[in-house]
Image (cartoon, coloured by chain):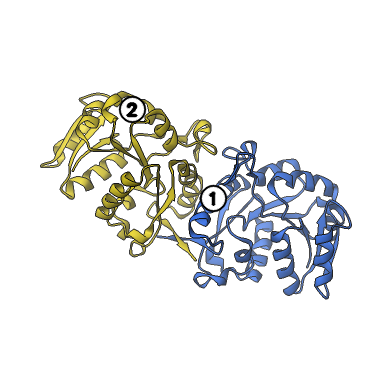
Chain colours: A blue, B yellow
Amino acid sequence: MKIAILGTGTVGDTIGSKLIELGHEVRMGSRTANNEKALTFASKHKTGAGAGTYEDAANFGEIIFNCTKGDASIEALKAAGSALDGKIVIDVSNPLDFSNGMPPSLIPSLSNTNSLGEEIQKIFPKTRVVKTLNTMWCGLMVNPAMIGGGDHVNYICGNDAAAKSKVMALLKEFGWKENNILDLGDITNARATEAVLPIWLRVWNVTKTGAFNFRIIS
Amino acid sequence: MKIAILGTGTVGDTIGSKLIELGHEVRMGSRTANNEKALTFASKHKTGAGAGTYEDAANFGEIIFNCTKGDASIEALKAAGSALDGKIVIDVSNPLDFSNGMPPSLIPSLSNTNSLGEEIQKIFPKTRVVKTLNTMWCGLMVNPAMIGGGDHVNYICGNDAAAKSKVMALLKEFGWKENNILDLGDITNARATEAVLPIWLRVWNVTKTGAFNFRIIS
């Protein structure tokens, strides 16, 4: 499949590299066509990887991963413009607000009664936004079996059932077992998965490892 | 030990009844001295249970559980007044805001960069507030062994180490194993544990059981 990665940070590189490993073609997008990290991503993989602007990448991809920082996501997606139309946007970002120091809080206008995921869906109504994977360290996103036999929770939400099915299939390629993927319903549920970050950050601070996740026990 | 329960709802009744079972003396406090639910609580237990106003209960207890609804907690504690001075307040409440429909969001002024737990500590500086147990259904608070061999997480936070130690001892009486109680640090970490509610409510909505909790897998 042809997939766009928007964002050149660790999350984008980790997901993009996994997709290449799985045999997909990936184009990494950034603000400029010659972003050093995107070019490094493209050149370190022998085949299947490319780099370009946000718009280039979005034009290329059938599915688009938003791996930009939460406070820059809307701007990045706006730069991709109409190239997003009709496409699935997998939003793995979180609206972290570092302006009050560490640990970050959430951007007030994108939390509690709103969320980054639903804001993206509102601003880009021709896309089908699916929120998933945003409640964990990126190493686990693409390799859940790293801990606990892969038995820990990944939430998914979005308004379009067919889009969620396609994303589910991709998650299974990453190693996610279907019974560990919890479909919460429509995109407004991103309010809850993004609100996992405050506790995630503090558990991380205490345990000093990002390689953890939550399992639902009942 | 002499313990006050502020609040006459299911949470207060569940914790109060467990404390009686463990041999503690409990006084349940409410706005009025003759609250029907508090009187029922007092009369259904053969010994050790009483009822009174918030102030009566706070005067009686060495430790005070805040089991009032989050949007009424500050008012309830103000009614207890100076009877709170020098005491440990175990805050198990959450600042849920039902004004936007279901599922509830969090009260804006008590979320993200603030929390109910730290607001109580600010308003009542002579108390030692310990936030714990607020991330689960009350049945599990006092009987963690009900699911998963009791191996799931309970967070604790507060500014006073000695107060947290005392609360830890009480949690162990409830059946909590020490290695499942995660000390996050000072009371500002209540921002994170109260922010567990949005995801808790949605998992509950999907799974249709409150008898679940999260285990940290690493």
Q: Is residue B57 above or below residue B181?
A: above
Residue appearing at x 64%, y 69% in the figure? A174
- Mark 2 highlights which residue? B76
Residue B27 in view in this figure: yes
Of all chains, the one bearing label 1 is A
Helix, strand or loop at disc 2?
A: helix
The amino acid beneath tag 1 is Val
Labelled disc at residue B162: none
Closer to us: B118 or B73: B118
Mark 1 Cα-neighbour bin, 10 Å: few <14, some 14–19, many ≥20? many
Name the residue that disc number 1 marks: A196
Q: Secondary structure at mark 1?
A: loop
Q: What separation in Å lies between label 1 and label 2 (alpha carbons)? A: 29 Å
Picture quadrant of residue B150: bottom left
* The residue positioned farthest toward the left in the image shown: B46
Q: Position of residue B77 (x, y in %)?
A: 33, 28
Q: Nearer the viewer, residue A195 or B80?
A: B80
User: Along the line of sight, which residue is nearer the eye, B210 or B169?
Assistant: B169
